[in-house]
Amino acid sequence: MKEEGSIFLPLFFATTTKKLKCVYLFCTTYNWKSLAFCTMPDFIKKYFRRTEGDKNKFNSPATSEQIASLENQLEIKFPNDYKEFLKFTNGFEGFVNEFFVRFAPAEQIYKSTQDTCAEFFPWAIYIGTNGNVEMFVIDKRQTPYQFGLLPYIADDNDFIPLGDTFEKFIERLYNDTAFEKQ
């Protein structure tokens, strides 16, 4: 059984005519072990810290077409939770707890990947940075893909995997365990 991903949940309710209706609620992430469900707004609220003066910058959502085009350019299928993040905010600059993050919008990811990864890290897809010495990348050398940190000046062995989903990656940043062995 697949443990994580996106699903449609049936939601039944009675109408005013006492007929049973079914609508489907789209859940972006789930974990079968805990049966914990999370929508993208819940995910954002949990991990993306509100700052004084609300200096976190959320962008307008990416369209499904923008994401599909990017996936075609990069010859990859992004994990569902990352696609849902882009559909919620096409790029972000601000804080995940105390950790500064800058996630590139879909229209900049291909060019940023070509500029920062293509020559020395052809396995990496650039998705952002901490504004310091590490970039956030998706490692496509294995499946499931790994989200992680890669120093700008590095070799392949310097990649720090932080999770096979975007949520696990963000959770490691949020819990300040990015540099701890797991």
Image (cartoon, rainbow, N blue to C red):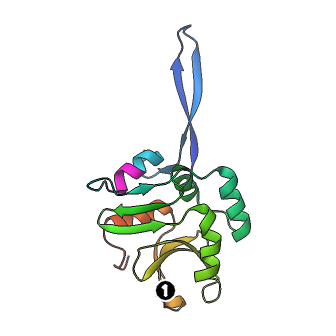
Q: Is residue 142 above or below residue 24?
A: below
Residue occupying the point 65% across, 71% down:
110
User: Looking at this rendering, what residue extends furthest in the top direction?
Assistant: 17
Magenta residues, start to end:
44-49
Please report the residue visible at 52 percent of the width from the left and 55 percent of the height from the top: 85
Q: Position of residue 96 (x, y in %)?
A: 35, 62
State whether the magenta stretch is mostly helix, strand or loop.
helix
Q: How many marks do you count on the picture?
A: 1
Location of the N terminus (image quadrant)? bottom right
**Residue in the foreground of this view, choosing between 5 and 133:** 133
Find residue 178 and report its horizontal and vertical position in percent.
Answer: 37, 74
Residue 67 drawn above or below residue 20: below
Placement of 36 over or under 152, stated as above or below: above
Residue depicted at 49% across the width and 62% down the height: 166
Quadrant in the picture for the C terminus: bottom left
- 31 horizontally vs 48: left or right: right
Which residue in the structure is indicated by mark 1? Answer: 152
- Given the image, on which type of amino acid does mark 1 rest? Tyr
Task: State whether residue 103 is above or below residue 1.
Answer: below
Give whichever of 24, 130 is nearer the camera.
130
Q: Position of residue 70 (x, y in %)?
A: 68, 63
- Name the residue: 50% across, 54% down: 59
Q: Is residue 140 in view?
A: no
In the image, is residue 171 part of the stretch drawn in magenta? Answer: no
Q: Looking at the picture, tell me which residue is in the foreground, 158 or 49.
A: 49
The kind of secondary structure element at disc 1 is loop
Q: Quadrant of residue 172?
A: bottom left
